Image: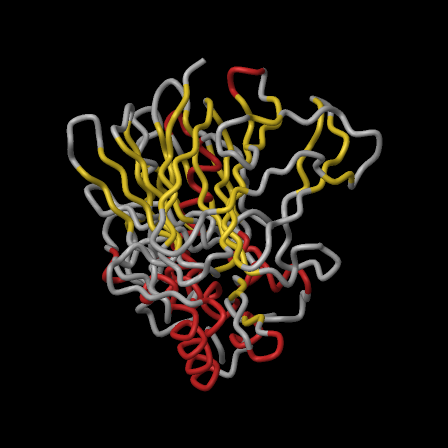
Amino acid sequence: MATLDIQLKNETNSDKVFVSITGLALDKNNALFLLQKDGKTPHYPGQPGKDQTPVQENCAIPLGKPGSTKTVTVPHLAGSRIYFSIGEPLKFLLNRGGNGAALVAPSVNNPADPNYKTQWHFCEFTWDNSQLFCNISYVDFVSIPIALDLTEKSGNKQHVTGFGADGLQNIVKKLKEQKQEDKQPWDSLIYAPNGKIVRILSPNTVIDGNRKLFQGYFEPYVNKVWEKYKKEELSIDTQNGSWGTVRGKVGDNNVLTLSGKGGKGYTFTKPSTADIFSCSSGPFPTSNDEYGNLGARIAAGFNRSTLMASNSQPNNPSAKDYYKDPHPTNHYSRIVHEVNADRLGYAFPYDDVTPANGKDQSGKVADPAPRNFTVTVGGGRKDVKSDIDSVEL
């Protein structure tokens, strides 16, 4: 069975860093996979007798003292995560599933979750017969600094820096400044019990817990976009050879209608603020087809506030134009990108929508057959001196 070695590097100042690796084992009919404490032995949990059953094997890998590197080995995996926690291991539970055990992932917005007060973060990866693909996800929250390094088969190197030890404080500072500017509850994204910053939640995550937060925030901008495209044509490049460029306008029925090849039409009603932050409710489909492709580009245009700036999406606005419109924008995403040293990271669900010949903003590394793959916790830079216990408001 094919395996992949991953180097895990501790650049924090803590000797209590733990790693948990989960995923679906592609060579075992997508069975649930966890890596055991030794970093080499797979654990495939059987169907539990009841939901919320704790994982029986020890699947918390101690990363070692600061400056140390541990090599772990995994099989082909899909939907995999490398979790880092500081202070204590994460507690994983199992539910009954149709294809065997189903993992209950740690939650950042459920106070009843056993990991709620633990500081943790993750990167996501898939390794199959075609490639290794990994990115740092900030879609739900930001917490511990993570960096990625990949050496391609050719010898070329890919690097995603992440943010430094003061990253959380910088995000908090910028969120508070933004609240002062627009009077929106950006400080509600901060989870800092007893003055210690544990994580920064995304707007979509906090809205899940309180639908009143940010209510009406994007609606004035949506109204202006709709008025613009009643008079002008919106053009969306699907960046797919089969679908091409799709165009349309807002009709008298107040619905945006886009016509694709062969005259096939796609309709979008006005999204709400919650729809825009989630990118998956209201008019935005999550299907992996032309309709979903168009919805992703419209949702990205709203989050980045580029729909008033250009009639051509997503190509004419470049990264330097994102979040610059004076109308409402996704300031969580803006700030997360600003704080990351290379401005890369997956900060909202369609942050991988990229202009033609533009730079991908999602903070990914990928290669069909990498020589080396390293994931660093603590910032991934020599100037990072991450001491999570000192991260305070």
| Residue 57 x %, y % | 67, 34
| Residue 248 x %, y % | 39, 44
Q: Nearer the viewer, residue 36 or 149?
A: 36
Q: How many marks can you see?
A: 0
Q: Nearer the viewer, residue 112 or 207?
A: 112
**Residue at point 66% right, 47% down?**
91
Taking 45 as reference, is 147 left or right? left
| Residue 129 x %, y % | 38, 18
Q: Nearer the viewer, residue 364 or 178?
A: 364
Q: Nearer the viewer, residue 151 or 321?
A: 151
Q: Quadrant of residue 236?
A: top left
**Residue at point 56% right, 79% down?**
195
Q: Which residue is the extreme one toward the left?
A: 155
Picture layout, residue 188 above or below residue 122? below
**Residue at point 40% right, 53% down?**
377
Q: Which residue is the extreme one toward the bottom?
A: 180
